[in-house]
Each structure stands twice: as structure tokens, then as C-alpha cells.
Image: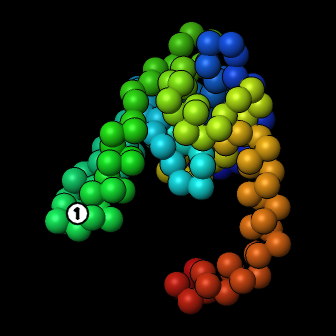
Amino acid sequence: MFIGEYNHNLDDKGRLAVPKKFRSDLSKGAVVTKGLDNCLFLYTKKEWQKLAEKLASLPFAQANTRAFARLMLAGAMDVDIDKQGRIILPEYLREFAGVKKEVVVAGLYSRLEIWDSQKWAEYKKRTEVESNVIAEQMGALGV
């Protein structure tokens, strides 16, 4: 289970140090892809396989289904953790998320999200202001 918020820096080669507590979970390989809200998603191979199977089973005749599958699947890249616990974030994914130097790695149970630190701060501020409204909507979903 991935939880928590961690501040890290990208090096000049686009490498990101994965928080130490998550490295063993990702040691068998991982997948990074375009996420939502201008961030990147990082999955273990096992979680990625589950998601990919769900996406592949969606009705491809629907335009939104195709668009979402393309975003997630075509934008994905296998990554390996090196001996220093780093992964390389491909340039096209860094550009997509606007990730520059300072990043936040946020744990969200079955995935990690990788954010440009400024964008994360803006997103957090916005959602914290709306937290009561969001909580009411989640209550309607049984949460």
C-alpha cells in the first residue's frame, strides 16, 4: 500500500529517487504513465497489469473509452529501479506533467503520483478549500 507525501528532486538526467519505503514494492519492475490532473502515475507491474486488463476490456466503440485507453496505455513506459533507488522519467512524460526539478511523490494506495511541486501545492490548496463539498459527494458514494 502506497501512502504519504514525499519531496524529491530530479537530477539532470531526469532520474527520480523513489522513496525508500516503496522501492521493494517496485523492485520487480514498474510502469509510469500519463496521469490525470497533470501528474504522472507510477504502478507496480502487478497493479499495472490489472489496470491494463480493465482498459482492454472496455468497449472500444466508444470514443471516450478509446481516448482514455490511449492516454494511459500509449503514454506508458516500463521503468526499472537502479542500484541507487532511482527511475528515469522519460522526457515526454516530464513535459506532459510539467515536471522540472522539484517533485512530490504522493502515495495513493495502489499507485504513486508524481507531481511538479508547484502544481501539487496549487492542487492541494484548491482541493483543501473544497474539502467539505468533496466529502459530501463521497458520502453519496458510500464513503
Q: Left or right: where does residue 18 sit relative to residue 131?
A: left
Q: Position of residue 64 (x, y in %)?
A: 32, 65
Residue 122 higher or lower than 59, as above or below: above
Q: In screen coordinates, is 36 left or right of 19?
A: left
Does 26 sit above or below residue 143?
Answer: above
Estimate how packed mark 1 is, as few (under 14), some (14 to 19) or many (20 or more) residues with alpha carbons within 10 Å: few
Tell me if residue 76 comes above or below residue 101 in the rendering: below
Q: What amino acid is found at the position of numbered circle 1 in the picture?
A: Leu
Closer to the camera, 10 or 94? Answer: 94
Residue 104 point in image, percent of width and height: 72, 39
Q: How is the image coloured?
A: rainbow
* Quadrant assignment for the C terminus: bottom right
**Residue 78: x, y in percent?**
39, 27
Write down the residue under mark 1: 58
Tell me where residue 98 sits by quadrant.
top right
Question: Which image quarter: residue 57?
Answer: bottom left
Task: Judge whether residue 133 can be spotted in this image.
Answer: yes
Instruction: Report helix, strand or loop for mark 1.
Output: loop
Residue drawn at the location 56% of the way across and 89% of the way down: 140
Q: Residue at x 46, y 20 (%)?
A: 80
Residue at 77 percent of width and 31 percent of height? 102
Q: Residue at x 70, y 29 (%)?
A: 100
Between 55 and 92, the one nearer to me in the picture: 92
